Image (cartoon, rainbow, N blue to C red):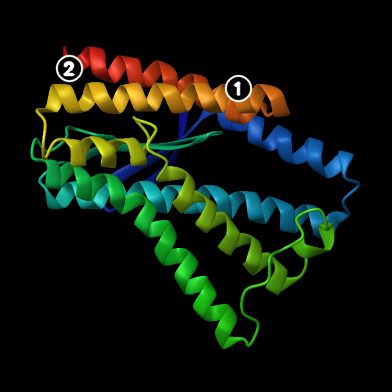
Amino acid sequence: MRALSLGRYFRIPVYVHWSFLFVLGFISYTSISEGMDKVQIAAFSLYIFLVFFCVVLHEYGHALMARRYGIETVDIIITPIGGLARLRGMPREPKGELMIAIAGPLVNLALATLILLLLYALGVGIILPDTDDLSILTNPIGFLHLVLLLNVILFAFNLIPAFPMDGGRILRAILCFKFDRKKATFIASIIGRAIAIGFVLFATYNRLPSLLFIGIFIFVMAGREYKAMV
């Protein structure tokens, strides 16, 4: 794996994968195609940075909760499609897996709540941002609304029960209270692959390459997770 070290925090190393260069290409392409000026480019770049910073915090939610159950984290890797906390194992008891899986989304919920409280303290409240208006990037309040929206999306999207996403692991943990781990994994993987097919069909029809890739990734990984249990 070719990756650049971003440092070590809470005894957990953080790396950015080489494919993250595509993000820099995306920023450059979008800036040119949208005709952004220097201020807008700076604000847009900052927003993309905050997207991945929130993803890192999300992964630290998993990692630090895992530590509470005696499981250390090998590292956290940042890629163009998100982050991955590579744990040295997973608790056998359902409660431990449930707490580790839900910790990441709860970090995003906490961030969204803090931003919302800040907006109300500023006397603004919730205003759905017009993401097609470039001026929102250079408007501090509009920028905060975008970051709020980002964390709400990260929270909701990760709760989709598409195993092995967070929501799928939460589903498996809940199923483990009733079934053995193998059967729970089988049920979660079937549901995950069904949702993945839905992602692929939706992404193909609406020409969303990133969602298409995510759908394929979930489908493949759901099968691998189950085979690892057999």
Residue 61 in view of the camera = no
What residue type is disc 1 on? Answer: Leu
- Is residue 38 rendered to the left or right of residue 137? right
- Is residue 31 rendered to the left or right of residue 7? right
> Mark 1, residues whose alpha carbon is within 10 Å: few (<14), some, or many (≥20)?
some
Q: Secondary structure at mark 2?
A: helix
Q: Residue at x 23, y 35 (%)?
A: 172
Q: Residue at x 56, y 87 (%)?
A: 121
Q: CA distance from mark 2 to mark 1?
A: 28 Å
Q: Which residue is mark 1?
A: 201
Considering every residue shown, the one lying at the far front of the view is 178
**Where, quadrant-wise, is the C terminus in this rendering?**
top left
Q: Nearer the viewer, residue 205 or 70?
A: 205
Q: Is residue 28 above or below residue 142?
A: above
Q: Which residue is mark 2?
A: 229
The percent coordinates of residue 39 (x first, y second) are: 82, 60
Q: Are marks 2 and 1 in contact (CB under 8 Å)?
A: no
